Amino acid sequence: MLTFKDVTVKFAGVTAVKNLSFDVPEGKIFSIIGPNGAGKTTVFNCISRFYTPASGSIEMNGTDLLKLKSHQVIREGIARSFQNVELFANMTVLDNLLTGLHPNLKKNIFSIALNLPSVKRTEKESIKKAYEVMDLLSITDLAHEKVSNLPFGYQKMVDIGRAIIAEPKLILLDEPVAGMNPVETEKISQLILRLKQEMNYTVLLIEHDMSLVMKVSDYVTVMSFGEKIAEGLPKDIQKNPVVIEAYLGEVEDGAEII
């Protein structure tokens, strides 16, 4: 579904990503892991078209993403949550979720100004979909609560919900459980599995919680200092000495990334 080929990203002479290649299969959960500063979020920012690589190519189902502007990426079926939640703090949970549907709305300004029946019908359908997402996240009771009043864990759920509501083909999740307690983390891990198993979404995941990564992932790519150092099944990545050394600095007999 998504193909990275020989992608290099540089900032003021510093190479953040170097000759990175990987393929994300449709209907799978593909995780990118690595120590802080490995270049993981830079990968997401290239897909979202916030950054332009110095070289290489990025394709989504054959479409060259590097020819698109950032606001056009969602039309290719790509939605994203953020490491630091990017929500409208003074808007309600419901209204934040509805903003995720904005790129899919087709009504023109005249239909809206005249408040035609088609506009009312679209609004009703959008609200229904937002409540379905809130029900999935078990946050329906927070529909009319301002996001700024919510604990960080719930803000992360709203951020994920806003990505889900557009019904994308590919969902980018950037550290979805960062700042969450164990109960919230388990809830999100179950949600990620449901996205694949029940909704047939493809998920590209960045996460530091190794227990979650190993639990939900079909494939894992490991980055260190901008380069791919390993790729494979979670059980193989756990025991890979190169990966263990990148995280721990040295390899001991029987050591694993958990």
Image (cartoon, rainbow, N blue to C red):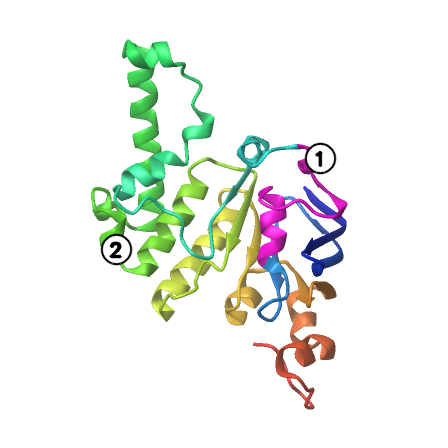
Image quarter for residue 49? top right
Precedes in sequence: disc 1 or disc 2: 1
Q: Position of residue 30 (x, y in %)?
A: 62, 55
Q: Residue at x 34, y 28 (%)?
A: 126
Q: Taking 222 as reference, is 80 left or right?
A: left
Q: Is residue 58 magenta?
A: yes
- Position of the C terminus, as image quadrant, is bottom right
Amino acid tagged 1: Asp
Q: Nearer the viewer, residue 85 or 138?
A: 85
Q: Position of residue 60 (x, y in %)?
A: 67, 38
Q: Taking 243 as reference, is 157 left or right?
A: left
Q: Residue at x 41, y 32 (%)?
A: 101
Q: Is residue 84 above or below residue 2?
A: below
Q: Taking 120 as reference, is 40 left or right?
A: right
| Residue 68 in sight here | yes
Q: Is residue 167 above or below residue 6?
A: above
Q: Is residue 49 magenta?
A: yes
Question: Distance of mark 1 from mark 2, alpha carbons?
Answer: 38 Å
- Proximity of marks 1 and 2: CB atoms separated by less than 8 Å: no
Residue placed under numbered mark 2 in the picture: 150
Q: Position of residue 209 (x, y in %)?
A: 50, 69
Residue placed under numbered mark 1 in the picture: 64
Q: Position of residue 46 (x, y in %)?
A: 63, 47
